[in-house]
Image (cartoon, helix red, strand yellow):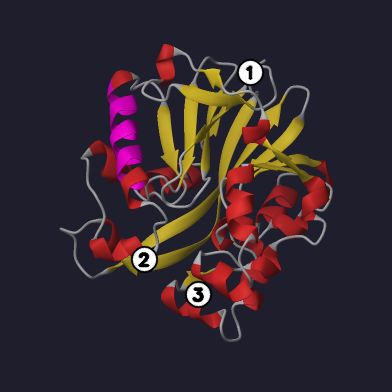
């Protein structure tokens, strides 16, 4: 049962020196958009993949020690850019979002969660267990702002990685194993641990036959997997598992060669941002 539609939205952006993601690059500031995907499933309704920034992120990072996050990662955001408001402009009320697939628990992916109080949250237990073992300050060092997580989160979560693990089609190789999110072949989740423990990505199958991989922060730019470009050593401060991160780059590179018809969309990539600006819709 394929997905009827996938549309991307930009919900603010942060800046880092280009050299962070490309050791051969300069120290000039580079924009990294926080993109969110809206999917429409024929029976499950509207689904979000992550939630981007929101005003709650700016509020949470006003005071110490959380202000450290904002200083290290300058964020540019206006209320009009919240995914809740952008969906409203599309004629979609927040209550119509049935599911949020959360790739991982970093603040630029979780900041909009509280705007969708009726949505079921789907994520990896592996990711949640890793974050909840820490106090608020320690969680901050892992990129997680506990303030952004809904108080009733435990009641609203289902864990994708508790589903039976299945073998994936040869089209998705070298990703051999995954989880059929709804049991109908529309979305397959894969473990992309590296940038964060338990980070997930999803293969989306559309009615047209088109396949898309929403790979979250497995890479920050498409250039990384296209050219096998590994980030600056300083990113080890931001990456939970450097060995797994490099493995993901290699696997995405191989996927792009094996199945060039699959669009690989990293959350923070300029190419993904261009699809937003062009208003492109996958159907």
Mark 1 or mark 3: whose residue is earlier in sequence: 1
Q: CA distance from mark 3 to mark 2?
A: 13 Å
Q: Dot 1: within a 10 Å radius of its alpha carbon, few (fewer than 14), some, or many (20 or more) residues? A: many
Circle on res. 43:
none
- Tell me the residue that label 3 is attached to: 69
> Residue 60 in the image: x percent, y percent?
64, 76
**Magenta residue span:** 245-257
Query: Quick check: 210 above or below 38?
Result: above
Pointer 1 residue? 2
Residue 72 location, quadrant: bottom left
Label 1 SS = loop
| Placement of the C terminus among the 4 image quadrants | top right
Above or below — where is 114 with respect to 204? below
Query: What residue sits 22% from the left and 46% below the top?
Result: 229
The answer to whether residue 92 is visible is no
| Distance (Cα) linking label 1 and label 3 | 39 Å
Going 34% across and 33% down the picture, which residue do you hit? 252
Q: Main secondary structure of the magenta part?
A: helix
Of callouts 2 and 1, which one flags the residue occurring earlier in the amino acid sequence? 1
Task: Tell me the SS state at disc 3.
Answer: helix
Percent position (x, y) of residue 224?
Answer: 28, 45
Q: Nearer the viewer, residue 280 or 114?
A: 114
């Amino acid at each position: 049962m394929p997905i009827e539609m996938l549309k991307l939205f930009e919900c603010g952006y942060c800046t880092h020196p280009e050299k962070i993601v490309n050791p051969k690059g300069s120290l000039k500031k580079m924009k990294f958009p926080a993109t969110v995907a809206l999917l429409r499933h024929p029976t499950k309704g509207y689904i979000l993949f992550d939630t981007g920034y929101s005003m709650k992120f700016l509020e949470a990072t006003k005071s110490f020690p959380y202000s450290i996050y904002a200083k290290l990662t300058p964020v540019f955001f206006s209320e009009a850019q919240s995914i809740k408001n952008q969906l409203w402009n599309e004629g979609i009320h927040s209550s119509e979002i049935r599911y949020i697939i959360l790739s991982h628990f970093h603040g630029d992916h979780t900041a909009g969660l509280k705007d969708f109080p009726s949505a079921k949250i789907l994520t990896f237990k592996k990711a949640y267990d890793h974050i909840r073992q820490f106090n608020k300050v320690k969680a901050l060092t892992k990129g997680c702002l506990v303030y952004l997580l809904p108080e009733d989160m435990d009641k609203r979560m289902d864990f994708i990685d508790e589903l039976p693990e299945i073998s994936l089609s040869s089209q998705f190789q070298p990703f051999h194993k995954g989880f059929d999110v709804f049991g109908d072949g529309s979305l397959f989740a894969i473990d992309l641990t590296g940038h964060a423990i338990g980070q997930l990505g999803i293969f989306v199958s559309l009615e047209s036959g088109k396949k898309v991989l929403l790979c979250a922060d497995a890479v920050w730019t498409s250039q990384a997997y296209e050219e096998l470009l590994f980030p600056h050593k300083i990113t080890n401060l931001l990456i939970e598992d450097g060995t797994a991160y490099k493995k993901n780059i290699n696997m995405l590179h191989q996927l792009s060669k094996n199945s060039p018809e699959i669009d690989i969309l990293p959350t923070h990539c300029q190419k993904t941002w261009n699809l937003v600006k062009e208003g492109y819709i996958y159907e």
